[in-house]
Amino acid sequence: MWRKNKMAYSEKVMEHYTNPRNVGTLNKDSKSVGTGLVGAPECGDVMRLQIEVDENNVITDAKFKTFGCGSAIASSSLATEWLKGKTVDEALTIDNMDIVEELALPPVKIHCSVLAEDAIKSAINDYRVKNGMEPIAMPKSHH
Amino acid sequence: MELPIYLDNNATTPLDPRVLEAMLPYFTSKFGNAASRNHAFGWVAEEGVDYAREQAAKLIGCTEKEIIFTSGATEADNLGIKGVFEMYSDKGNHIITATTEHKAVLDTCKHLEKLGAKVTYLKVKEDGLIDLQELEAAMTEQTILVTIMYGNNEIGVVQPVKEISAIAHKFGALFMTDATQAVGKIPVDVNADGIDLMAFSAHKMYGPKGVGVLYVRRKNPRVKVTAQIDGGGHERGMRSGTLNVPGIVGLGKACELCRLEMDEEAKRLSKLRDKLEASLSQMEESYVNGNVEHRLPHVANISFKYVEGEGLMMAMKDLAVSSGSACTSASLEPSYVLKSLGLSDDLAHSSIRFGLGRFTTEEEIDYAIENTKKAVNHLRDLSPLWEMFKEGIDLSKIEWAEH
């Protein structure tokens, strides 16, 4: 339906939306880079999240690009911020509800946080498979 | 120039100060009940209502007795469709409408289906217009009503109302139109257009909210509707309830102003709209939705591919517009009107509706053009789809995890 311009966005969503962190592209062909591309254009949101992992399994860089609403952009921006400096194992513990809480997302926007969690896990899996590891099980999408 | 800029005049319009001025006495000194026949307070209120009725009738080319005041276009749609269904049940139970109608029509028809109505929902062509041959093919002896909107609220296309009414009449059916977006914006004449029932609302034409009209033809043929609100028998028994006198006076003034100023206003607005549309459709991968010849002068609906409408509106922060995006709806379904045109979901998600109005200035349009361009470019910089498109990747070949 037709939605009006002024949505009930939290200040944190507005802040990430206005000043998104870590927008960009890493070399997806590099062995140290994992790429996650989740969502679908037909559904109105697509996230691409990339991580760069060093030899100590630490995420040294993270980048995103997102097609979607303000909450989707903010969720992926926040995710990249949280990923940097974490080990891959620590990154796996990021739960979508942490994002919901941090950004104060309303119920209709929870799917944006789910998508961000999917993007993190999908990027990690891409990295794992590239480096000869088994992929971890993906959480079942809630949307 | 004040910010934010209001470009959502299809949702509602600001009250014209001249309308407000006409209304004010009817809140205070002229507070009487228009149905009070035995004292001056009632007469004064009734005079106000009579003048308004005359103005509304003049605007659409009918007589005063054919104007039934309601609480708005939604009620008028309900009264017209349900009232005809009930009144003409002996004749048949078939209603024809279109998939791009307003919910006030579609949901009313759906309700009647539960009560035994057969409803045909005509599809529209890519440009938003119905196919007259399809309409003719759908007509049966059971058809009592064809209800097709005049101008569409999302894309502004104007249906071939004259031709539609001729087909309806050929088969002995009545023709009704929801003209909420058209009355006061373009010439609407119930006789020239062959309209039997017509709904419209004051707040889309610089009048107040909470008041509208159902036009009901009294001659050739004499149309009757069964009342949906029973009570004191107001409005010739078709719509009971104490008249909203200040609202009705406001509607009348709004009709008067539209009748006097419409031609000039339409010219001015279509010029501004065309300027906006020409500038924005020059942007790469932007598409104008709906027929560009047969349409209202003040609406532009544009899809900016690879950006999502709601996110885009957030970036157009000084502009009040609407989007066909559905990011917030539980179903994740974008605008059903745009989908009816055959637009892919991603283009429907990427659409913005600009609705210009009486108080829109050229300076505001210039600002809107720059602001929109900036926002689209900003969001494309953030969009993985734009990057992929630029790399020449065919997005339709990618297996998306639909959710």
Image: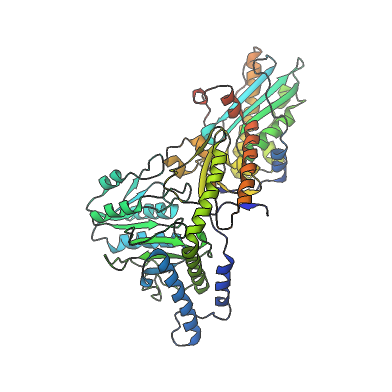
Q: Residue A128: x and y, percent? A: 65, 17
The quadrant of the image that shows the N terminus of chain B is bottom right
Q: Quadrant of residue B54?
A: bottom left
Q: Is residue B331 above or below residue B197?
A: above
Is residue B157 something that shows in the picture?
yes
Report whether A123 appears left or right of B109: right
Q: Nearer the viewer, residue B15 or B120?
A: B15
**Closer-to-camera residue (B166/A28):** B166
Looking at the picture, how far across and down is residue A54, in whole percent? 75, 17
At horizontal 23% and vertical 59% (from top left) the residue drawn is B91
The quadrant holding residue B275 is top right
- Residue A41: percent from left, percent from top: 54, 32
Residue at (53, 28) in percent of width and height: B401
In the rendered image, residue B56, in percent from the top left (x then y), is placed at: 43, 68
Q: Nearer the viewer, residue A124 or B257?
A: B257
- Residue situated in front as seen by the camera: B253 or B119: B253
